């Protein structure tokens, strides 16, 4: 089955043609138009600017992807319906509606978080279930258990800011460009992670919830107290801040593994591109026999359309709908 997948939930316009056969999703073509340069001048995503850029880019991207995949008409369409920015989501949804009506093909209205979860099995065989998924992105930090590919339950989520937001805000107070995660990560590589004792929010809390607002404040207070910053001091601060986030994410995930005994741990979301997080997870789960750790390929960590095609396919027909009923769902909780 060839699925044309569309993702416009935030600031990346992404279109992919994925080929789903025998339990595996292969990416025949994918094109993503990043809007980072547009938003960088504002220090973050401006919804109105994002929606306009999606509207300008979506049709040429669809045509280019179909041409690259040498396909005139797919067997189905998958589109992100939420969660995300409402005006951005509607651009993808309208494109999907129009194409589904024109081509008379089925349409899947997929959940973005499920997309991040399934990003770890693009071009890979279906892993063993039950699985535990940790999704860490700019807007979400969630732990999810999946009894089967099409049955999931959220265990916990952030009570305030997401881990990606904490990275982005600390970068901003340090005067680093948007998006901050990769900037912090790059500088952290040359720093000492024990140099500054940043808080580890909710580390010892028994729930599977997260909270990063306090860490964000601690980062801002530290920057205010250290206005003269050398390269070395910035590297130490980035490494220490990153370490605080990594420790909390890894500890909560490990606790969930001990409680729910999943056969697979699936990772997803932009923050899972972070090298320190990837290394800490690999080290931790190397000692858990019988648990397979699945990290997405780096190119599938940030928002991309292939993961939306994968979510449509792996969740069976859970997201199947009609073009008439398809709508943006900005607050769609898992
Ligand atoms: O999943 P994503 O592309 O978009 C959302 O759904 O939010 O995630 C974007 C987030 C941003 O906060 C960005 O700073 C963060 O992922 N990010 C990283 C890294 N690469 C991207 N955070 C830490 N280290 C990285 N290497
Ligand atoms: Zn995302």
Image (spheres, helix red, strand yellow):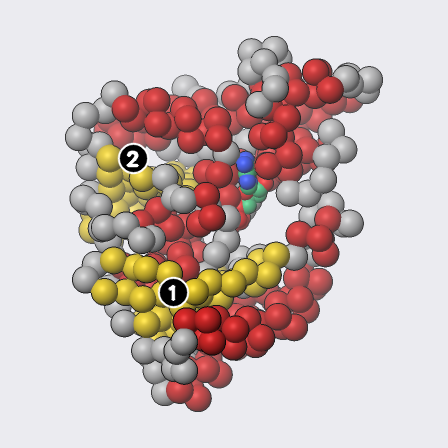
**Mark 1 — residue?**
28
Q: In the displayed structure, would residue 45 be above or below residue 175?
A: below
Camera-side residue: 264 or 165?
A: 264
Camera-side mark, 2 or 1: 1
Q: Quadrant of residue 280?
A: top left
* Residue furthest top as drawn: 195
Could you say which disc has been placed on residue 242 in the image? Answer: none
Q: Nearer the viewer, residue 320 or 182?
A: 182
Determine whether the beta carbon of the residue marked 1 sits less than 8 angstroms from the nearest atom of ligand 2.
no
Count of number-bearing discs: 2
**Residue situated furthest right in the rendering:** 228
The image shows residue 191 at horizontal and vertical percentages of: 61, 17
Residue 117, placed above or below residue 32: above
Position of the N terminus by quadrant: bottom left
**Foreground of the two, 213 or 43:** 43
Point 22% across, 46% down: residue: 127
Q: Secondary structure at mark 2?
A: strand
Q: Is residue 12 left or right of residue 311?
A: right
Q: Are marks 2 and 1 in contact (CB under 8 Å)?
A: no
What residue is shown at x 25% (from left), y 21% (from top)? 287
Q: Residue 150 vs residue 162: left or right?
A: left
Instruction: Tell me if I can see residue 134 in this picture.
Output: yes
| Secondary structure category for the residue under label 1 | strand
The reply, left or right, for residue 236 in relation to residue 127 is right
Q: Position of residue 265 (x, y in %)?
A: 29, 37
Mark 2 surroundings: few (<14), some (14-19) or many (≥20) residues within 10 A = many
Q: Which residue is mark 2?
A: 293
Q: Is residue 59 above or below residue 172?
A: below
């Amino acid at each position: 089955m060839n699925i044309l997948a569309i993702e416009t939930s935030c600031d990346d316009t992404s279109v992919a043609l994925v080929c789903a056969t025998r339990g595996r999703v292969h990416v025949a073509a994918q094109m993503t138009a990043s809007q980072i340069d547009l938003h960088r001048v504002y220090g973050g995503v401006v919804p109105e600017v994002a929606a306009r850029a999606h509207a300008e880019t979506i049709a040429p991207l669809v045509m280019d992807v179909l041409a690259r995949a040498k396909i005139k008409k797919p067997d189905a369409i998958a589109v992100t319906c939420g969660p995300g920015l409402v005006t951005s989501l509607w651009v993808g949804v309208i494109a999907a509606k129009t194409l589904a009506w024109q081509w008379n093909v089925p349409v899947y209205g997929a959940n973005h978080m499920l997309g991040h979860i399934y990003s770890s099995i693009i071009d890979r065989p279906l892993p063993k279930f039950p699985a535990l998924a940790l999704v860490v992105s700019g807007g979400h930090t969630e732990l999810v258990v999946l009894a089967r590919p099409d049955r999931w339950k959220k265990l916990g989520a952030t009570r305030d800011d997401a881990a990606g937001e904490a990275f982005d805000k600390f970068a901003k107070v340090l005067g680093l460009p948007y998006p901050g995660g990769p900037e912090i990560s790059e500088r952290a590589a040359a720093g000492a992670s024990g140099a500054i004792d940043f808080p580890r929010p909710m580390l010892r809390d028994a729930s599977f919830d997260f909270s990063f607002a306090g860490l964000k404040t601690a980062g801002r207070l530290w920057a205010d107290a250290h206005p003269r910053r050398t390269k070395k001091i910035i590297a130490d601060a980035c490494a220490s801040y990153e370490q605080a986030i990594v420790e909390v994410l890894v500890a909560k995930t490990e606790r969930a593994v001990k409680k729910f005994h999943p056969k697979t741990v699936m990772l997803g979301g932009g923050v899972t591109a972070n090298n320190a997080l990837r290394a800490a997870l690999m080290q931790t789960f190397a000692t858990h026999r019988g648990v397979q750790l699945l990290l997405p390929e780096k190119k599938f960590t940030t928002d991309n359309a292939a993961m939306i095609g994968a979510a449509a396919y792996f969740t069976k027909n859970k997201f199947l709908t009609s073009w008439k009923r398809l709508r943006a769902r900005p607050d769609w909780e898992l």
